[in-house]
Amino acid sequence: MPEQYGSEHITSLIPQAMAPRVKPPRHVSNYKPVVKADASKNKHESKTMGPAKVQVSEPADYMKKSDRSLPEPQKTEKKSVRKPKVPTRYEQNAVAAKTEKDFIKTNAIENITSVPRKPTAQYCDTNTGNKNDLLTSGLVPRYTMKQDFGELPPYLVARNIEVQAAQERYDEYVAEELRARALEQIGTQQRAELLRGLKAKWDDLHQQFQGLSVVTDTAPKKNRKERMEAQMSQLERDIDLLERHSTIYVAKH
């Protein structure tokens, strides 16, 4: 019985002997004798060289040539295959046909003009002399050895041709537009007059700008000041353009 809490006793500390394990009885089939009898049945019939009693013939009654008691062996037809003819002594020792070719000179010329074979590129990676192929190792940039290295692929060449043709068509279009508009060049006197007029306008705007109120506390004041600043900046860019370039083209109206 398992010990319950509060029911401890000193006798429960004494080790107890384990009860012997009792095995259940082994299963035995009811058909064991039948199976054993069937297995031993007809087991020793072919143990000897034949039946115990046979009919033995008399010594004088031996097998003769004319005895037909046994079947005759079947004859198999063999196809005769003739071997090739043995060559004659003349055919074996036939002399080669005479030739005018100088084999010594020919071999010398072939060896002199031949290209020597290049040794295989290898590298050694161990102190025992282990060699490996250098070209397939990745240590050599093989792409630089290609015949088409550094050349543009065909699709890029075709694309460049198309881009160049498109640029030429655009240049022709721009030239036609310029000729249609008939641009004319401004002379030196007209350029000077334009500069004087732009500077005079800038001075006038600058004088008006100086007269504006410092405090832009209303929206109209702020908008007027920004508008005048934008006009003065545009005039300054136009004056700078006329001063830096001596040749200027304008469209005819």
Image (spheres, rainbow, N blue to C red):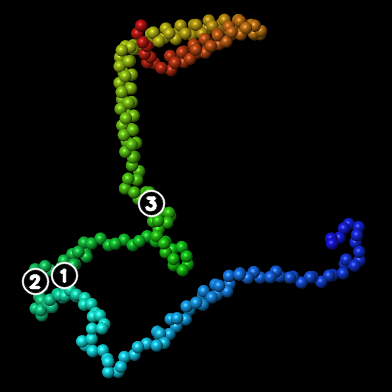
Residue pictured at 19% horizontal, 75% vertical:
77
Whether residue 92 is visible here, answered yes or no, is no
Judging from the image, what secondary structure is the residue with disc 3 in?
Answer: helix
Q: What amino acid is labelled 3 in the image?
A: Arg
Q: Is 55 in front, or is 242?
A: 55
Q: Is residue 2 above or below residue 103?
A: above
Q: Which residue is mark 1?
A: 104
Q: Is residue 8 above or below residue 225?
A: below
Q: Dot 3: within a 10 Å radius of its alpha carbon, few (fewer than 14), some, or many (20 or more) residues? A: few
**Sequence-first disc among 3 and 2:** 2
- Disc 1 to disc 3, C-alpha distance: 42 Å
Residue pictured at 39% horizontal, 8% vertical:
190
Q: Is residue 184 left or right of residue 213?
A: left
**Sequence-first disc among 2 and 1:** 2
Q: Which residue is mark 2?
A: 97
Q: Is residue 2 above or below residue 173?
A: below
Judging from the image, what secondary structure is the residue with disc 2 in?
Answer: loop
Q: Is 120 in front, or is 215?
A: 120
